[in-house]
Amino acid sequence: MAGYVWEWTWDWYLASYYGTPESLTNPHGPVSGSARVLRGGDWDDGASYCRSAYRYGINSPGNSYSTFGFRSVRR
């Protein structure tokens, strides 16, 4: 999950979300927002970003970057 590329997630980003009562059990993120969450980091940004718990928000999911990716999941 960490090291190769940042991974886009479906969650909306809100820097202050974690730590609220609704985030304590199985957090899904805020119900709306202007930025999506990126997780995981890439080695190019430095080792401190390369962990799955690291979250970053960006509001331009239509742009492509060589260090951004996504994971396909089938339920």
Image: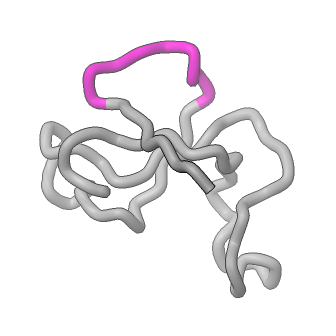
17 to 55, vertically: above or below: below
> Which quadrant of the rendered structure holds the N terminus?
bottom left
Task: Identify the image quadrant of residue 17.
Answer: bottom right
Please identify the residue farthest to the front as the structure is shown.
Answer: 75
User: As rendered, which of 11 and 54 lies closer to the eye?
Assistant: 11
Q: In this view, does 44 lie to the left or right of 66?
A: left
Q: Is residue 61 left or right of residue 25?
A: left
Q: Which residue corresponds to the image point at 43% horizontal and 51% vertical from the top-left?
A: 39
Answer above or below: position of 53 versus 73. below
Q: Where is residue 11 in the image (x, y as percent from the top left)?
A: 67, 50
Is 27 located above or below residue 29 in the figure?
A: below
> With 16 as the anchor, is 52 left or right in this view?
left
Indicate yes or no whether the magenta region holds residue 2.
no
- Tell me the magenta residue range: 59-67
Where residue 7 sits in the image (x, y, percent)? Answer: 41, 43
Chief SS of the magenta region: loop
* Residue sitting farthest toward the right: 31
Residue at left 22%, top 44%?
42
Residue nearer the viewer, 43 or 69 = 69
Residue ID at (34%, 19%):
65
